[in-house]
Structure formats: C-alpha cells, structure tokens
Image (tube, rainbow, N blue to C red):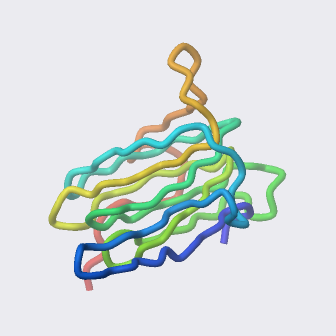
C-alpha cells in the first residue's frame, strides 16, 4: 500500500425504510480536518484522472455504481516512491479511501450506470488558486493502464 493511504470499510445499515451509510465521522481515527463535501459523477467507461494536491487530503467514497480508483506515488522521499495502487469501490464494495497530499489519483467508472462519488477534502476549494496539478489520463509518465483487463 502506498505510504499514507488509509481505508475504512463502510457499514451499510438497511431497514424497511431504506438504508444508511456513514462515510466519515469526526471521531474516526483517520479524520483529519473538514474543508467541504462535494459530489461528482462519472459516466460509464470515462476516466477522470490524473490530479494531485500539495496541501489537501481527499476522502473518497463511491455511493452509486462502481469505480476503479488508481493511485500513484511520485514523492521521491517516500518509501513507496513510484508505486501504484488500485481499488474497486462502490455498490459492491463500500469503502472510504483517504488520499494524502502529493499522491496522483483518478478513477474510471466500471459500472453500467453513472457512478456517484463523494469527496470530503480537508481544505476548501480555492477558486483563484486551486490546489491541484493535473496530468493527461493517458499520456504521462505514470505506469498505469486504464484499459479493461478481460480474461
């Protein structure tokens, strides 16, 4: 696992009215700070990648559909320098992934329906000076292939 990445299995509590799933609590051992909460969607087979932050830690959960989340560690001082990780999260694997600053990350919707992702970053988005560096999802130096692996 890339140094600094944390995961939390999410518990779904169903009853006759529907279901409830807590994503992140202030008393969780991985809670750091609250910046904001936002929702983003991704259509099937679309890749949203690569980006990283210098200050912000992201807390990502997929609440509908399924995504393949990929991570890459470009931090030269890290014990996991140049490592990649891959997680599948969503309907069939309710999981929170905490991604520290400095890690490139992105995802691909692998379900037949639109994926809905919640992010709870530790910082408020700065419209004038965004804490975000981006790379093309397919043309970069990251050793990761977004194509589906059939077999």
Asked which quadrant contains residue 15, the reply is bottom left
Is residue 51 placed above or below 20 in the rendered structure?
A: above
User: Which of the image's four quarters has the C terminus?
Assistant: bottom left
* Picture coordinates of residue 113, whole percent (x, y): 16, 62
Image x and y of residue 126, in percent: 56, 22
Residue toward you, 32 or 77: 32
> Residue visible at 49% across and 74% down?
10
Q: Nearer the viewer, residue 14 or 132?
A: 14
Whether 97 is drawn above or below 13: the answer is above
Where residue 93 sits, quadrant-wise, is bottom left
Residue sitting at x 48%, y 71%: 95
Which residue is at the far right? 77
Outermost residue, bottom direction? Answer: 151
Compare residues 149 and 122 and report the one nearer the observer.
122
- The correct choice, above or below, for 82 with respect to 130 in the image is below
Quadrant where the N terminus sits is bottom right
In percent of width and height, residue 63 lies at: 34, 62
Furthest residue in direction top, as rendered: 128
Where in the figure is residue 14, as x and y percent of width and height? 32, 80
Residue at image coords 72%, 51%: 32
| Residue that appears at 31% across and 67% down | 66
Classify residue 27 as left or right of residue 131: right
Q: Which residue is at the front of the view, 118 or 80?
A: 118
């Amino acid at each position: 696992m890339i140094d600094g990445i944390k995961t939390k299995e999410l518990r779904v509590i169903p009853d006759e009215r529907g279901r409830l799933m807590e994503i992140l609590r202030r008393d969780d051992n991985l809670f750091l700070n609250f910046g904001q909460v936002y929702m983003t969607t991704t259509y099937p087979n679309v890749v949203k990648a690569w980006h990283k932050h210098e200050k912000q830690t992201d807390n990502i959960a997929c609440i509908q559909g399924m995504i393949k989340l990929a991570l890459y560690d470009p931090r030269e001082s890290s014990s996991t320098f140049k490592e990649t990780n891959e997680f599948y999260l969503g309907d069939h694997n309710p999981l929170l992934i905490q991604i520290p600053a400095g890690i490139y990350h992105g995802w691909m919707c692998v379900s037949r329906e639109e994926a809905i992702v919640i992010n709870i970053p530790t910082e408020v988005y700065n419209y004038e000076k965004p804490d975000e560096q981006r790379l093309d999802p397919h043309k970069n130096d990251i050793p990761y292939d977004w194509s589906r692996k059939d077999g």
